[in-house]
Image (tube, rainbow, N blue to C red):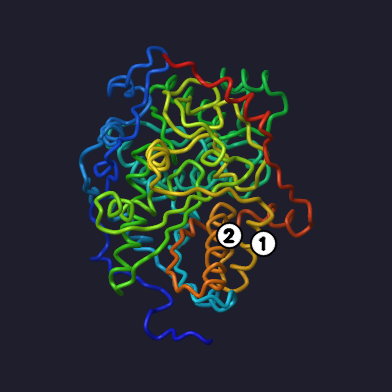
Amino acid sequence: MSKNVDKIPYKIYLEESEMPKAWYNVRSDMKNKPAPLLNPGTHEPMKAEELAGVFCDELIKQELDNDTPYIPIPDDILNFYKMYRPSPLVRAYCLEEKLDTPAKIYYKFEGNNTSGSHKLNSAIAQAYYAKKQGLKGVTTETGAGQWGTALSMACAYLGLDCKVYMVKVSYEQKPFRREVMRTYGASVTPSPSMETAVGRKILAEHPGTTGSLGCAISEAVEVATSTEGYRYVLGSVLNQVLLHQSIIGLETKAALDKYGIKADMIIGCAGGGSNLGGLISPFMGEKLRGEADYRIIAVEPRSCPSFTRGRYAYDFCDTGMVCPLAKMYTLGSNFIPAPNHAGGLRYHGMSPVLSQLYADGLMEAVAVKQTDVFEAAETFARVEGILPAPESSHAIKVAIDEALKCKETGEEKTIVFGLTGTGYFDMVAYEKFHDGKMENYVPTDEELEKSFQLLPKMD
């Protein structure tokens, strides 16, 4: 080992007493607040009472709160977090040596729980508030399956029923993730399905479709709003989810501060925005307040390029057009992504919070092709000893690219990226990569324009 590893440990762990006791609401420091959700019928901002039939009461308060900087984490949730948090911030010494770069690379590892990803941070919070409200159960969608797995775990822990609508292509490609959900007591249905009116409509319009997160959201919302004692919960995109996931960034910053480390750039994969938003929140807060500056990079797949090729406009959050309108970077709710193996990134839109920050020039975005992502994943796995999820590997790809730029320039920059989870349930994807059967689908301008034409017409 050529680098001196004595000064900074391989893994920086916070003590349990150092774990954050409150979530950070980055909206409180945003000069330009994210645009409000709109009623699809009236195009007026959604009121709390209008959202009450879909979401839990306390979560609605968090969703609409643009001003409170810190929201205390209930003790019951903190105690649950302590089973797997604080999670480690890891210095990627072996990757640095492999790349022969002067850059210092750190990754925040969120895969050290049975769900295999960061999704459990919000799943337990949303399930807790549903239980506290006296509900019987919740419905949700899932792409790659991390969110569905996390929510099924949280519901099992709290004694809630859990109904999961899983994007059909992931349901077929990731049977073991599906079985973990069922092990924790959840019912899992491939989406779109014939179980719901909106599912039947989507299948009629798109025969043989492999589905999308937008389709699955529509089905989950329909079931929640038509079943007494149930509410819908979402694993990404919403303000409340980014709030819960801020614990990732808060821990990351605390670990860096513990050793006097200043990050130059923060990199995260971007699908709906939960991991990226959570990771960057406290750093973005400093940037918004003028206390520090960071280069913040969102990484998305070229097959579903919401930031880099989408329109910043009001759009439905779901394919069935039953959800509120959100102003976000979107490819159009009618856009059905290719069966990309990074299932958690197959969403047509992006978090309204992140969309506003991107529109204000406070962060960058880059789209990468799938085979390059898996090459980066393989490089990382061979030297760092963790098999990364395809979603996480988008961040790995750009972290490697940036480290190699440092090699060219001789700059000793500090790179931090989010390793959102493990890829041990994604072996079909790795198999296709190794067998040379993986395709780098990129939507044409014509395909996107066709979808853009169906965006809601606003007054």
- Using the image, determine if residue 370 lies above or below residue 238: below
Can you see residue 159? no
Q: Amino acid at mark 2?
A: Lys
Q: Residue at x 69, y 30 (%)?
A: 209
User: Is residue 16 found left or right of 248 in the rendered image?
Assistant: left
Residue 133 locus on image (x, y percent): 28, 32
Disc 2 designates what residue? 397
Quarter in which the C terminus is drawn: top left
Can you see residue 265? yes
Q: CA distance from mark 1 to mark 2?
A: 8 Å
For disc 1, the neighbor class at 10 Å (few under 14, some 14 to 19, many from 20) is some
Q: Amino acid at mark 1?
A: Glu
Q: Residue at x 55, y 73 (%)?
A: 407
Q: Residue at x 39, y 79 (%)?
A: 9
- Name the foreground residue: 339 vs 192: 339
User: Is residue 100 found left or right of 155 in the rendered image?
Assistant: right
Disc 1 designates what residue? 375
Q: Which mark is residue 450?
A: none
